[in-house]
Image: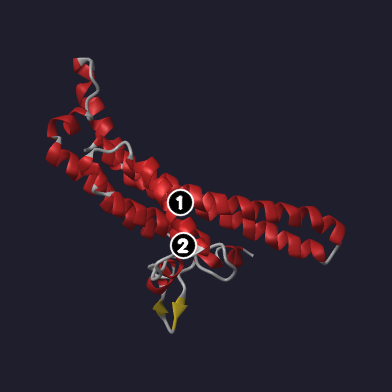
Amino acid sequence: MNENLFASFLTPMMMGIPIVTIIIMFPIIMFPSPKRLINNRIESMQQWLLQQTTKQMMSIHSYKGQTWTLMLMSLIIFIASTNLLGLLPYSFTATTQLSMNLGMAVPLWAATVITGFRHKTKMSLAHLLPQGTPTPLIPVLVIIETISLLIQPMALAVRLTANITAGHLLMHLIGSATLALMSISLTVATPTFIILVLLTILEFAVALIQAYVFTLLISLYLHDNT
């Protein structure tokens, strides 16, 4: 039971070779480049959602911050589509891997911090010491603020990993319970199946919300440093 519970989180292999890279490229299929003069309904809906997200997320940024628009929109599309593809049966969710989420969080966070120190050095250093701090507490607060700054990418990655992993574990456990109860009594299994359906709908929402939250926090870090 314990081995099967976490089997879906193991890195998929083919002939002894990890195929995570191929799986990560799957979202490209969902968003092909439009080749028609007039888009179909799906492409029009995708473009409308992307425009609304861009308008809401990038409206607070200065001109320098808005140069990150393409990167941030690509990030939210990639995370959301990866999360949604992971809900399909017999699929692999790459965002359940902490190493991959750290690989996204650390470079983007570092880029925002470097941008802040490059263009607003005094303001970036001022964030490490709140205004009006008593003199004896200055060294302690500088250390605390530095630690809180350094753990931001870890918090980003752990939040995304924990939420996606927890949802998949719950779906696996309730699905297993539903199958076990169906062999005993359909009457008892029906409420469990309803809970499973509701949880699946919730996971669709969580997949999109977590992609938005991850990208929004990167956007806020960028806003603080530009």
Q: Is 57 situated above or below 188?
A: above
Report the residue at 15% width, 39% height from top: 117
Q: Nearer the viewer, residue 208 or 7?
A: 208
Report the residue at 61% width, 50% height from top: 202
Q: Is residue 102 visible?
A: no
Q: Is 124 situated above or below 15?
A: above
Q: Decide if residue 113 is on the left or right side of residue 165.
A: left
Q: Nearer the viewer, residue 27 or 83?
A: 27
Query: Residue 104: percent from the left, percent from the top?
Result: 33, 55
Residue linked to disc 2: 43
Query: Residue 96: percent from the left, percent from the top?
Result: 47, 58
Q: Look at label 2 and name its amino acid.
A: Glu
The N terminus lies in quadrant: bottom right
Kindly state the secondary structure of the residue where label 2 is placed.
helix
Query: What crowding class fits label 1: few (fewer than 14 Cα within 10 Å), some (14-19), or many (20 or more)?
Result: few
Between discs 2 and 1, the one toward the N terminus: 2
Report the residue at 43% width, 65% height from top: 38
The C terminus lies in quadrant: top left
Q: Is residue 74 visible?
A: yes
Q: Is 67 situated above or below 184?
A: above
Q: Look at label 1 and name its amino acid.
A: Leu
Residue linked to disc 1: 49
Kindly state the secondary structure of the residue where label 1 is placed.
helix
